[in-house]
Image (tube, rainbow, N blue to C red):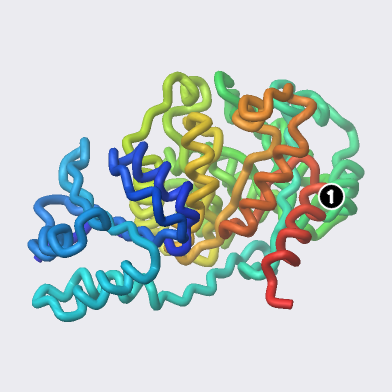
Amino acid sequence: MIHPEYQFLLNDIPADIALSYLKRTFRWQLDKSNQNPVTIFIHYFNHEPPEICTSLIHAFPGFCKLANRPAGGSVFLVAAHFTVFCRIFNFLATAEESQLFLDIETLFNRHSNPSFKVRNLTWGKDQPRIMGILNITPDSFYDGGNFFQRDDYGTVAEQIIQAGADIIDIGGESSQPGAEGVTEREELNRILKVVNQIRQRFHIPLSIDTTKPAVADAALAAGADMINDISGLAAGAEMIRIIRKHNASYCLMHIQGTPAMMQHRPHYDDVIGEIYQFFQSKLNICYAEGLGKNRILLDPGIGFGKTVLDNMDILRLLPAFSNFDNLILMGTSNKSFIGKILQRDLNHRTPGTLATQALGWMKGATVFRVHSVQETKDTVEMAKYYTQDL
């Protein structure tokens, strides 16, 4: 039996977005005459696909495709507007090989209601959540030095809370492109006093932006509730064991490379598929260590080893990651791809940022890591009102 590495379904994708992604990623030029929304099914195989894939290509030319994967194996794609996709689905229902039919049926009928636990709270997908950024660094790309070496971080936290934050993300090491790391000792010196001062006054969940298990251990022991790990779980199971030790929560982010080199010619054959595979493999490590899915956020890592087109593909096709049973965190705040698209310097990217956050909510993101808390809260609340059943 053929065992796919992974598969996902994207339903109701605007035609222009679907055509652009399939052309650039799989060299597949679809018919542009039909501008109805497109349903895309992508199934990655480790080796030869079953014969039913070839049968579908012959029965529905132009709507099904097999392609080789540069890393080995193959990928089977179906891309069609809904009526044609239903015909393909009915064809599969009568075929002798039923596995592909069952795979698509499962994805179509999937009803996921993910939740996320942090501190003593449970967040659902129905309400946007705002993560306010508090960088205790001299060199972070947007606010480096603004909060470095303050005496009273409780007052800073109060301002973030009053602006509408649901959680505060404290970072003691810059992760901007080209950033060099700091020692564990220096990182702890920066963040522990912040955690202690905030925890003395407030019960708001605190996240620690770190890649180091020792820093995570000390910060969680001091009263933090979550680790936001931009390294893509570079520390492996050791980090997850520390999360479990403190009954804490975790944000798993995708990155290509390290901050020092991540923007030096990043390249993907299939940015969506590769991030999807990354999440699947890293989640397996988390689950093997006993960390439940409701303790894990997924962040596709916009701006972390990505080109402008990569970032836009992630934003456009964010629903691909809703195939996992985890809430999605999105961090676009003031990032360089916004500046490149709009030709805006660092201090004039707020409108572009807010547009990405509204789109992010409509595409399936729930948690938004931001510098401008109140503005983001208003933006995503309006996006929520637009999308909800009145």
Picture coordinates of residue 65 (x, y %)? 21, 52
Q: Residue at x 64, y 62 (%)?
A: 118
Q: Quadrant of the N terminus?
A: bottom left
Q: Is residue 27 left or right of residue 311?
A: left
Q: Quadrant of residue 68?
A: top left
Q: Is residue 381 left or right of residue 321?
A: right
Whether residue 127 can be seen here: yes
Picture coordinates of residue 56 (x, y %)? 16, 63
Picture coordinates of residue 145 (x, y %)? 79, 24
Q: Quadrant of the C terminus?
A: bottom right
The amino acid sitting under disc 1 is Gln
Q: Residue at x 73, y 44 (%)?
A: 354
Q: Quadrant of residue 367?
A: bottom right
User: How crowded is the residue under tag 1: few (<14 C-alpha within 10 Å), some, or many (20+)?
Assistant: some
Whether residue 173 can be seen here: no
Q: Residue at x 46, y 55 (%)?
A: 35
Task: Determine whether 101 is above or below 364 in the image.
Answer: below
Picture coordinates of residue 96 (x, y %)? 9, 77
Q: Residue at x 65, y 32 (%)?
A: 338
Task: Determine whether 38 is above or below 30 in the image.
Answer: below
Q: Which residue is mark 1?
A: 374
Residue that sits furthest to the bottom in the current view = 94
Q: Is residue 275 left or right of residue 352?
A: left
Task: Determine whether 149 is above or below 160 in the image.
Answer: above
Q: Please, what secondary structure does the residue beneath circle 1 have?
A: helix
